[in-house]
Image (tube, rainbow, N blue to C red):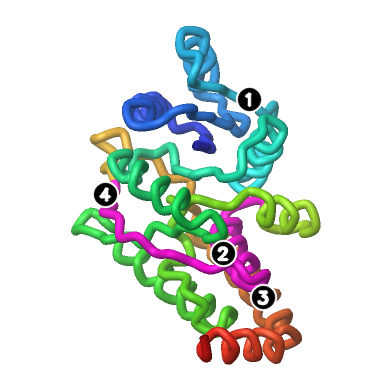
Amino acid sequence: MLIPSYNTGQLVLHTVAEARRVWRPVWVVVDGSTDGSGEALLDLARRDPQLSVIVLPANQGKGAAVLHGLRAATAAGYSHALVMDADGQHPAAKIPELMASAQANPDALILGRPIFDRTAPIERVLWRKMSNFWVHLETLCGGVGDSLFGFRVYPIAPLLAIMEHERWMRRFDFDAEAAVRLVWHGVRTINISVPVRYLSAEEGGVSHFRYVRDNLLLTWMHVRLVLEFLLRAPLLLVRRLRSSRR
């Protein structure tokens, strides 16, 4: 499994510890962090042979960090990668269930579908609904339960092929565009409900989401995807009709 991390402080150490209790190996890609978490993780990895840490010299974005991890995982012979955020939102207890689903369905994209509680910021939930609307359109309701939830198991080969070909998908736009493009390439989806908890500042919660910057990035992403969807729509519609007849 793969955890991209940028300036998440002690939270990433807690996330890694929780993940290691239920799974191995765990890889962390430190995306140019300046908070000392990279050094702490490297020290932890020296004492844990099932933990690997990749340290990038400068911050490149979540998608870029995942791409570095996917390349390393491919070189090591892995076929799938569970991606999990470092900020404590994703419950490690759900890792075995997602992994079991991927093992039973190796051709599928296993998507966590978030169940929010009262800690979820209302503005984040509303923007997520808007992004989900566009993803449902771009995939002709292709089964993406939530476009922005980053707790997923990816089949590495098709995702890596897509990312090596595309210049985008390197920052916050990664999660949504990865799901759309995998559906376009015929990868089926399986959604698994996952409880989510946003940590408060008092609990050490960290968010690098910037409402203006990242929403502009998502808007530009959906403009690109909708324009490309218009070209792909006939093929997607034919595929959908064929699958419905089976």
Q: Residue furthest left?
A: 118
Instruction: Establish if 110 lies above or below 58.
Output: below
* Closer to us: 38 or 78: 78
* Front position among marks 2 and 3: 2
Residue at x 67% of width, y 30% of height: 76
Dot 2 amino acid type: Ala
Q: Residue furthest front?
A: 246
Dot 4 amino acid type: Arg
The residue tagged 1 is: 55
Label 2 to label 3: alpha-carbon separation: 11 Å
Question: Which region of the structure is painted magenta?
Answer: 170-198
The residue tagged 4 is: 197
Label 3 to label 1: alpha-carbon separation: 31 Å
* Closer to us: 38 or 69: 69
- Seen in the image, is 184 located left or right of residue 95? right
| Residue 236 x/y as whole percent | 65, 84
Label 1 to label 4: alpha-carbon separation: 27 Å
Mark 3 or mark 1: whose residue is earlier in sequence: 1
